Amino acid sequence: MEQKWWKRSVVYQIYPRSFMDSNGDGVGDLNGIISRLTYIQKLGADIIWLCPVYRSPNDDNGYDISDYRDIMAEFGAMADFDRLLEKAHSLGLKIMMDLVVNHSSDEHAWFVESQRSRANPYRDFYIWRDGKKDGPPNNWGASFGGSAWAQAGPTGQYYLHLFSPKQPDLNWENPSLRQAVYSLMHFWLDKGVDGFRMDVINYISKVPGLPDGKVRDGSYGDFGPYCLNGPRIHEFLKEMHREVLGHYPIVTVGEMPGVSTDQARLYTAPEEKELDMVFQFEHMAVDNDENGRWTTNRFRLDDLRRVLSHWQTALHGTGWNSLYWNNHDQPRVVSRFGDDSTPEKRAASAKMLGTLLHMMEGTPYVYQGEELGMTNIAFDRIEDYRDIETLNVYDEYTRQRGVAPQDMLRRLHCRSRDNARTPMQWDDTKNAGFTTGTPWIGVNPNYRQINAASQIDDENSVFSYYRRLIRLRKEIDVITEGDYTLLLPDHPWLFAYQRTIPDQRLTVLCGFNGEEADCADALPFCKGRLLLSNYGEANGTIWRPYEARVYLEEGDAL
Ligand code: TEU
Ligand code: CA
């Protein structure tokens, strides 16, 4: 596999609304990001993934775009974006924009026109259908609850929205729509941005006829089989690559709920000329239960180990993995797969989880605050939550499914997207140094103990450990290129694997043990130089809580 620059890169994801507020209105903004760029540079990340900053009514916090060529008023102006780009580049940081083109906002000029009449030139920029027996065209349910169809305008027709009613799906069957998207992509790439993260990009090709889906739980049909990885998806992505992507030295990652390794290979193999990597979701479902995501269910190490190992071996030498634990849609990993019950276990397990991921093959993504060991939030009232998905699912489960409010709040504490969206914790001053105003969402009260100021100069902090992990990726070839072999596949609490190239062997041993334990099984693999440990040094077979060790063997005789 050719060595592409982004294979040794680490991406830092910024959710602008919650990152840094520069003007005291309680909402993060572009000038706030500019003021914190040197922090990201100190961490050692190479690329910033910027969640949507385009003009938006914020029904889904920017994932509902009303003008792809302008900046959201709350975040600043285009001049601020241009300064951010210039300053980032001057610090050696690249900027990856968030491209949301499966759907737009219903306040986009295209939709405002489209809903006027069947004959409007923009009608076919969206997916309009006649209803059936004065009901929606099919039984699909939307991701944020309710029917995936709504009516607008005087024609009585319905339009498709796989997310909220304010996020109408764009009609990719229409070549004019596709050209309009390619044109906006050129607009940003010609400004010098360095790539795109593409929101639910494997949703853009729908099965003709839009047939009813299987009704699973609740009363709506599943759109998945008819909208994910659809019949023309590769044709569309190859056209996008021909028309846009192939003309710039950029990096692309497709967010692909429901993608398999076989499909991921087709999306990311260089010879396919589509995308560079994908976000898969299998490891994000290991703690679902029979009711899906909305549960307090804990994961099983066997499942996590099996899924991550499968993706490592399936894409080795053919495609490329993105490696992530967190993003703005997921609960925080130290609370989810680690242990935030004490400061010591939180720090140890945060470092262990970082080790487990960053020593794998792929491009790692660090979500804002992950490098500090930031945790989930437990708001005790639904009124403290802000996320449309969280509010809708609380309403559905308490009013329609008979789940007690306190029980549903406990589930939200584990799975709500707002776990990732509380303000970045910069220091122990008011509002964690995020804003001098009233934050748009509550700050986690543990900011006094967990914040950047207390960690950036502490050699033993999670921040400093993440810096070492990121630096190792640039120094040790086997991390980028090595084969993957799972070790001790049945061990009850140790996740261990090896990466090898002819003259280097890396052995990574990560304990999910909550208490100190003896690990004689690990001893045969503890060979070579101890490259990194979250306890500083190794102590034979004694395995401290959430202990991680990385050994490196080098030489021709491996
Ligand atoms: O998320 C895609 C998606 O499938 C989400 O529904 C996500 O999986 C779910 O919330 C559980 O994690 C993307 C964006 O990342 C998300 O923020 C947007 O809300 C969504 O698309 C619509 O644009
Ligand atoms: Ca602000």
Image (cartoon, helix red, strand yellow):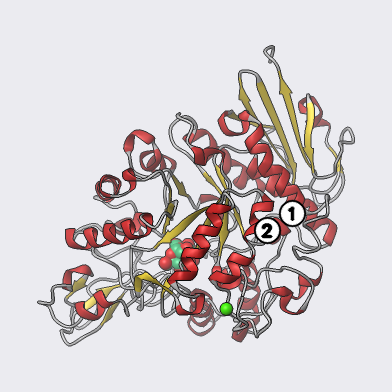
Nearer to us: label 1 or label 2: 2
Q: Nearer the viewer, residue 204 or 8?
A: 8
Q: Quadrant of the N terminus?
A: top left
Q: Does label 1 point to a residue whose CB lies under 8 Å from ligand 2? A: no
Residue under the point 38% across and 77% down = 146
Figure quadrant of residue 309? top right
Residue under the point 42% across and 54% down = 192
Q: Can you tell which mark lies on residue 463?
A: 1
Residue at label 2? Answer: 39
Q: Secondary structure at mark 1?
A: helix
Q: Quadrant of the C terminus?
A: top right
Is disc 1 in contact with disc 2, using a CB cutoff of under 8 Å?
no
Placement of 516 over or under 255, stated as above or below? above
Figure quadrant of residue 187? bottom left
Q: Position of residue 474 (x, y in %)?
A: 63, 36
Residue density around tag 1, few if under 14, some if 14–19, many if 20 or more, within 10 Å: many
Q: Position of residue 515 (x, y in %)?
A: 85, 50
Q: Secondary structure at mark 2?
A: helix
Q: Nearer the viewer, residue 37 or 365?
A: 37
Kind of residue at disc 1: Phe
Answer with left or right where residue 218 lies relative to residue 210: right
CA distance for labels 1 and 2? 11 Å
Q: Position of residue 324 (x, y in %)?
A: 57, 51
Kind of residue at disc 2: Tyr
